[in-house]
Each structure stands twice: as structure tokens, then as C-alpha cells.
Image (cartoon, grey):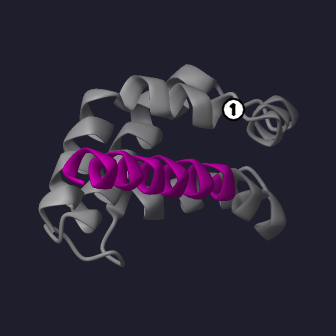
Amino acid sequence: MHNLYEIGAWLTQHSASVIEQWLNDPKILSIFTQHKINRQKFSKNFATAILSHAVDVMQAKKEMQNCPSMNKFVDLMLKNNITADEILSSVLPFAVLFLSICSSSLLRLQTMLL
């Protein structure tokens, strides 16, 4: 569990870079362009809170299913007539990025401990 807190601290410290990578994904850029969604507003209003919630869930501080920011995010997507496929396409790059950061951080931590 200690490693998850270190990874969470790293993600929090580097949240701007993580969010920038997520929002620069070609699928995300395409959805944002097609539906006229402002990247900076999205980052400020949704991405930061979603990342923060993901870290809190990873560190067992919050329940996964209780994320008001994610609910607002899905509401925004539906309001803009964004399809379920597009919604999943917008969340999937974040999930992959989040998991890859966590797994590579765990590997680094294991290497340091050995």
C-alpha cells in the first residue's frame, strides 16, 4: 500500500503533465474539435478533478463509483451529443496512461527496493 501512496504523490505532483498527455491524445483532440469543446476549460473543469479522484481511489481515500466530476463529465458529453463510443474513447487514453504510469512507477520502486 505504501507504494500506491508514493505513486499517488508522484501523479499529484506531475498532474499537469499527465493531463497534458491525456488531452493531447489524437482521439481526444478530434472529439474536442468536432464538438467544439475547449481543451483548457475541460482541463480546468474536469480533468484535474478526475485525476485527483483516481489518485484518491488508488490510495483508498474514496470509493471509485462516487466521482461527481466524472458524472459532470459524462453529462457534458451527453449534452454535446457525443456518442457512447466517443465518451469511452475520451476516457480510455486516460485510463491507459494512468495504468502505465502506475505500473512503471511500481517497477521503478521495486527496482529501488531490490
Q: Residue at x 34, y 65 (%)?
A: 67
Identity of the amino acid at label 1?
A: Ile
User: Height in image: 94 above or below 62?
Assistant: above
Q: x, y percentage for residue 96?
A: 61, 55
Q: Residue at x 12, y 61 (%)?
A: 2
Q: x, y percentage for residue 22?
A: 60, 37
Q: In the image, 19: left or right of 33?
A: left
User: Height in image: 61 above or below 19?
Assistant: below
Q: Secondary structure at mark 1?
A: loop
Q: Which residues are magenta?
A: 91-114
Q: Is residue 33 in the magenta section?
A: no
Q: In the figure, residue 16 lies in which quadrant?
A: top left
User: Height in image: 49 above or below 71?
Assistant: above
Q: x, y percentage for residue 87?
A: 71, 60
Viewer-side residue, 26 vs 87: 26
Q: In the figure, residue 77 lies in which quadrant?
A: bottom right
User: Height in image: 52 above or below 15?
Assistant: below
Q: Residue at x 19, y 64 (%)?
A: 59
Q: x, y percentage for residue 73?
A: 52, 54
Please state, as top left, top right, bottom left or bottom right, where the C terminus lies in the image: bottom left
Q: Residues within 10 Å of mark 1 (few under 14, many from 20)?
A: some
Which residue sits furthest front?
A: 114
Q: In the image, 29: left or right of 53?
A: right
Q: In the image, 81: left or right of 64?
A: right
Q: Residue at x 55, y 25 (%)?
A: 20
Count the marks: how many? Answer: 1
Q: In the figure, residue 46 lies in which quadrant?
A: top left
Q: In the image, 73: left or right of 32?
A: left
Main secondary-structure element of the magenta-colored stretch? helix
- Residue hosting label 1: 37
Q: Is residue 109 in the magenta section?
A: yes
